[in-house]
Amino acid sequence: MILPEKHYVTNLIIRDCHDREGHVGAGQVLASVRQKFWILRRHAAVRHIIGGSLQCRFWNPRLCEQIKAPLPSPRISPCVPSFRLWAWTTSVRY
């Protein structure tokens, strides 16, 4: 049976498969839906339903990025070596 992407029945079928499979990812939901139905633009439809699932949002929260303090100026500026040894410099002697 071919179903359109944005239809109430399509959303109910995808949501039922998502709940029945135990709130798994989009690939597993697509595999279970594809056994009986063919949905046009199925990846977008499944992502839309999974993105609206409150249980999935609660179980898989977005990770926050830590705010880092700026580095102090001595760590940013290039250091000047206190002494140079001849072995540290590279040159070609003919």
Image (cartoon, rainbow, N blue to C red):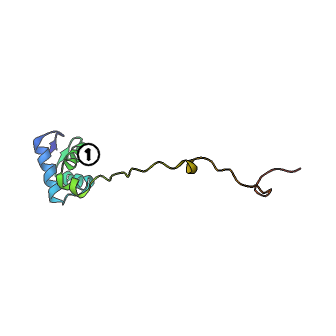
Residue identified by numbered label 1: 43
Q: 51 or 36: which is nearer to us? A: 51
Circle 1 — which element? Answer: helix
Q: How many badges with numbers are in the image? A: 1
Q: Residue at x 80, y 50 (%)?
A: 91
Residue reaching furthest to the bottom: 22
Q: Position of residue 58 (x, y in %)?
A: 21, 56
Amino acid type, callout 1: His
Q: Residue at x 14, y 44 (%)?
A: 10
Disc 1: CA contacts within 10 A as few (<14), some (14-19) or many (>=20): some
Apparent side of residue 82 relative to residue 75 in the rendered image (left or right) = right
Residue 84 spot, x, y in % from top left: 76, 55
Q: Quadrant of residue 18?
A: bottom left
Instruction: State which quadrant residue 3 falls in.
Output: top left
Q: Which is more toward the observer, 36 or 27?
A: 27
Please tell me whether residue 89 is drawn above or below residue 9 in the rendered image.
below
**Residue at x 13% of width, y 49% of height:** 13
Quadrant of the rendered image containing residue 48: top left
User: Horizontal and vertical percent for residue 50?
Assistant: 21, 50
Query: How far across and how far down the image is residue 29, in percent?
Result: 22, 54
Question: Which quarter of the image is occupied by the N terminus?
Answer: top left
